[in-house]
Image (tube, rainbow, N blue to C red):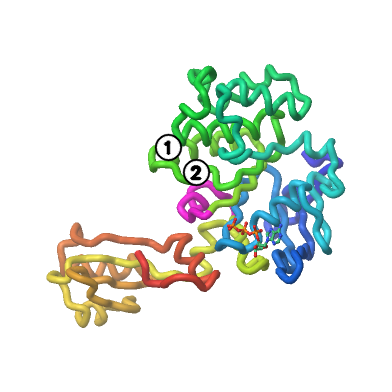
Amino acid sequence: MSGPDTQTEAHPGGTETETVVVLDGVTKRYGEVTALDGVSLSVRHGEFFGILGPNGAGKTTLVEIVEGMREADSGSVTVLGRSPWPRDTALLARMGVQTQASAFFARLTAAEHLRTVAALYGMDPAVARTALERVGLTAKENARIDHLSGGQRQRLAVATALLNEPEMIFLDEPTAALDPEARRELWDLLRSLRSEGRTIICTTHYLDEAEALCDRVAIIAEGRLVALDSPRNLIRSLAAPARLLLPAADLSAKEALALDGVDRATVEGDELVIETTAANRVLTALGDLVDISDVTVRTATLEDAYLKLTGTGSEHHR
Ligand SMILES: Nc1ncnc2c1ncn2[C@@H]1O[C@H](COP(=O)(O)OP(=O)(O)OP(=O)(O)O)[C@@H](O)[C@H]1O
């Protein structure tokens, strides 16, 4: 369905996808600092779109311009077919912005907090109940916010973005400071929001999160868009090698290097680390030489791609 508020984008396969956000040459300066430097990108309807980048890269500035909270110095911005600046209340009603957990009314209960936020935005306070149900917090509706766990508080933060049943949701580091179990539970919730057909724009510092959730990821460094693709394509386009790990006692680096397809072989502690872009071929060859159950395969991750693109860190981490 292509309504009057959306634009369509032709794809090589011939299909057309609705585009809900279009940025063209967006630049933003704060005095001497160029926070965004000619960023052009588009976000498709219904996608989970990640924005990644080192601290100070310009992510918040980018999201705030899309939300209509900041004005770009130059370039054009279209959201759901409209300009977000100057603030457009009809557009705001179609967006949900996750409030930061630190912005909560800490002494209120979860339900009171949501009713207060709803009232602030002129919504019926009854929407609080639906939002609490949606994030699985009904049992905690009467619990004070300062008595909630970190995961419950983050769910409440997501609930604030759902009060107006928005078409687009903006999330800002939704799983910051959560333990692994709480993160995974929140990921399930976020996936279910996406499966309802909502478009989600999410900043994160966690590469595993982007890999697990995002359809596409924009990587921003020093105000510029350095990559935009699916996590899988980003990993593939950089041809980051897979690493095969096995006990150093099983095979020497020299023997490994003699195998077809091995790019590098180094001993790290008591492990032999083999790098290859032909993991299947090398594994087959290793099967004749060592007990294959001793071999651990680590395929390239978004983190490999990210470190290469942003020029930070070591390429040889695991
Ligand atoms: N209101 C402001 N006034 C002046 N400089 C600002 C302002 N907001 C951001 N900046 C600067 O603009 C640049 C981009 O900041 P921004 O907050 O957009 O980055 P970010 O990628 O969101 O960073 P982080 O991951 O640390 O939140 C930084 O150099 C920052 O110091």
Specify whether 201 is left or right of 254.
right
**Residue positioned 21% across, 68% down in the render:** 271
The x, y position of residue 307, in whole percent, is: 48, 68
> Is residue 117 magenta-colored?
no
Q: Amino acid at mark 2?
A: Thr
The x, y position of residue 112, in whole percent, is: 61, 21
Asked whether 56 or 237 is in front, the reply is: 56
**Residue positioned 52% across, 46% down in the render:** 213
The quadrant the C terminus occupies is bottom left
Q: Which residues are magenta?
A: 205-216
Specify whether 69 is left or right of 262.
right
Q: Are marks 1 and 2 in contact (CB under 8 Å)?
A: yes
Mark 1 — residue?
182
The x, y position of residue 171, in whole percent, is: 61, 43
Mark 2 — residue?
175
- Ligand 1's quadrant: bottom right
